[in-house]
Image: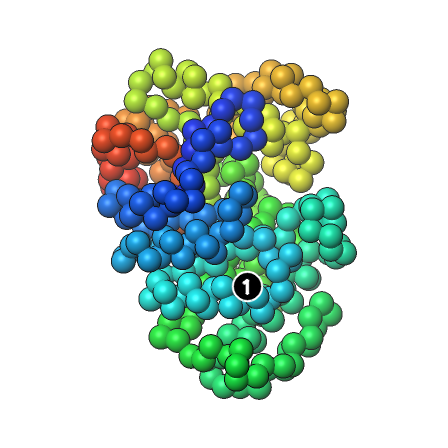
Amino acid sequence: MLIETLLPLGKLDPGLREPATPLHIKDFASGAAQAERLGFDAVLVEETKDDPYQLLALGAASTSTIGIGTSVAMAFPRSPTTTAMSAWSLQKLSHGRLVLGIGSQVRGHIRRRFGLDWHAPAPWMRDYINAMRAVWDCWQHGTELDFSSEHYSLNLMVPLFNPGPIEHPRIPIHVAAIGPNMTAMAGEVADGVRLHPVCTPRFIDSEVYPNVARGAARVNRSVDDVEFCMKPLIGTAADTATLAHVTDTVRARVAFYLSTPAYRRTFELHGWADIAEQASAAARSQKWEELPGLVHDEMLHTVATIGTHDTIAAQLRDRYLGRVDRIEFSVPVTNDSEAEAWRSILSDLRAQ
């Protein structure tokens, strides 16, 4: 199991849906170097407040061995050729350490934040990935660019805009997915599937694996050809007193996911559809303070993994060993004590 960390790191403020103190872009290079020293296998970024590809350029230039990747960057607001270029440049800079994680984003953001027309995301993403690979093949092997699909038609590449071959042209593509169509599409064309934190072990076993296998079977692939990547929702602290406060923060995050229709599949699977409806109604009424009270302890400990530093690794192994190939964390490391704690947790995770 590869162990990844998500940068920027930041402490979560209870009730908020984002880090209250995200790592500043000027500190990203040192943060990536710290992750490398701590022994993580990869450092990842997600697209929120800074451009992910610029962040990774800083991280790649300040490290030498740790993997780098997006978890995730938005695909559809960028053309596949634009994303192909960003990935190609990062792969050159990092000497082959990049994993490209991309996601579709929901309808409202595509239409109202990015000003684009909305299409069914799974077929759109399939075309996007195949278009990028056609561009890379053109650059690496000098083949004529001639890609045509429902969503993209690419047939122009002049020498001025052709960066040419690189030493490590094979760039793994991971897709963020939770629904059956996108997970099946990932099994068909992607190198990995990046699962949402609400994906419980039961959901992975009963929903994700069968759908990835269904997509893989379309093209005679094996489900073993697809990496399963998970950023579990965790709460951990050095002692039980501190963990109580952390648990409140995690409960608020679970409550937000509970209120979001796009993530309802997991809660429905566990028999909590009615509570999810209540949470959505509260969110529509802007009654955010009511949401954490809807997350009872069984739900909290089913969706999230919570424990002190000396127990959290064993709990994570029990839940995800044999289910996921890469596990990802977003944690603050602000002093030597926290750094040492995470070295110990990483060692415990790798014990099996």
Q: Is residue 163 among the parts visible in the rendering?
A: yes
What x and y, as percent, mark residue 3?
35, 46
Helix, strand or loop at disc 1?
A: helix
166, above or below 68, in the image: below
The residue that mark 1 highlights is 83
What x and y, as percent, mark residue 107?
72, 47
Q: Is residue 209 among the parts visible in the rendering?
A: no
Task: Give the colour scheme of this rendering.
Answer: rainbow
Residue in the foreground of this view, choosing between 170 and 296 = 170
What residue do we see at 48% from left, 59% from top? Answer: 100
What x and y, as percent, mark residue 152?
69, 70
Circle 1 packing at 10 Å, graded few (<14), some (14-19), many (20+), is many
On the rendered structure, is 262 left or right of 298?
Answer: right
Residue in the foreground of this view, choosing between 78 and 325 = 78
What residue do we see at 66% from left, 29% from top? Answer: 259
Residue type at mark 1 is: Thr
227, above or below 132, in the image: above
What residue do we see at 47% from left, 56% from top? Answer: 53
On the rendered structure, is 8 left or right of 73?
Answer: left
Residue at the top extreme of this rendering? 241
Q: Quadrant of the C terminus?
A: top left
What x and y, as percent, mark residue 142?
50, 86
319, above or below 152, in the image: above
Total marks placed: 1
192, above or below 81, in the image: above
What residue do we see at 31% from left, 45% from top? Answer: 30
